[in-house]
Amino acid sequence: MILRRCGLIAPASRLAMTFSGILQDCAATLGTQALDVLLPRSCMLCGESVSASGAALCAGCYDCFVKITGPVCTRCGKAFTSPHGGNHLCGDCITRRVHFDCARSAGVYAGELRRAIRQFKFNRRSMLAAPLADFAAESCEAVGPKQGYAALVPVPLHPHRLCSRGYNQSLLLALRLSRQWEVKVERDYLRRITWTVSQTSLRRSQRRRAVRGAFTCRSRRYAGKRLLLIDDVFTSGATVDECARILKRFGAAAVDVLTVARTLKGQPEWQ
Ligand SMILES: [Zn+2]
Ligand SMILES: [Zn+2]
């Protein structure tokens, strides 16, 4: 594992890890333990055996996730550079109108957490939903079950992207949190109605324009209620802000946001 962290892992080992991941995903899909008998489970990041726990990640990789600790912006959750002082509004949230009420991200989008999210999102490692959702849940007090959410709302994918990816990563995170918190998931309430190009390389202003009008709601079922949006990465906040705008237009009284990770200042998600 140490060799892999230093980037020194052999290509053959990488191949074995990929093959192992495919089999594990197959096992999850088929709902069977049969493949585990043939091939012991291994950590989806480093390949270390996790057969005893059946987890998708080993404890060593999970412990490498860097948590965001205060002080943070009370609105958008951005971490301040100085470790001193309390939470307060950041300059962006003072000067710019945002529609969500409180956004929090569990960790910094870097290192092992970035690798795990990219495997989860772009490499069909759906089993990583469990450790990533658990990390989000244990790291975020401000947007937890005590807030009395009427429902968890995953940020939806356009049907075309859902077809190509095979699953909505935000829905898998929300389903895991739903079981822990006993709050229902609204998987179809918020819908993505326009196809937009991947935003990973766009600047913030471009992202805001790209997602404007991209979502709609099915009804005013949650008028006066508090909702929690779930997504994997908070980059510019443009997507979740547009989702929050629409949820409020359809009557939601408050919309908070929970993401697993947040990019560092000025860091596009693809880096
Ligand atoms: Zn590992
Ligand atoms: Zn802020």
Image (cartoon, rainbow, N blue to C red):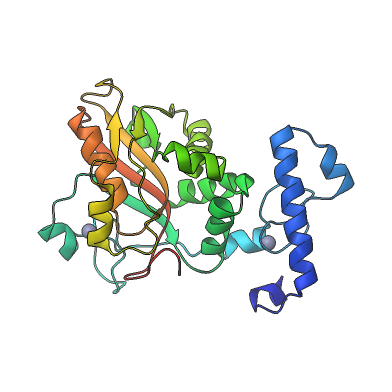
Judged from this view, the residue extending furthest toward the left is 95
Q: In this picture, is 200 found above or below 191?
A: below
Q: Is residue 31 above or below residue 157?
A: above
Q: Quadrant of the N terminus?
A: bottom right
On screen, 29 above or below 124? above
Relative depth, front residue between 238 and 56: 238
Q: Indicate the position of residue 79 as horizontal and vertical percent values.
A: 31, 65
Position of 6 with respect to 237 (left or right) is: right
Which residue: 40% across, 27% down? 188
Q: Residue at x 51, y 63 (%)?
A: 114
Q: Residue furthest right?
A: 38
For the point 34% across and 27% down, the residue is 150
Q: Quadrant of residue 95?
A: bottom left
Q: Position of residue 85 (x, y in %)?
A: 24, 68
Query: Where does ligand 2 appear, by image quarter?
Result: bottom left
Res. 53 in view:
no
Image quarter (top left, top right, bottom left or bottom right) of the C terminus: bottom left
Q: How many numbered marks have been drawn onto this rendered protein structure?
A: 0
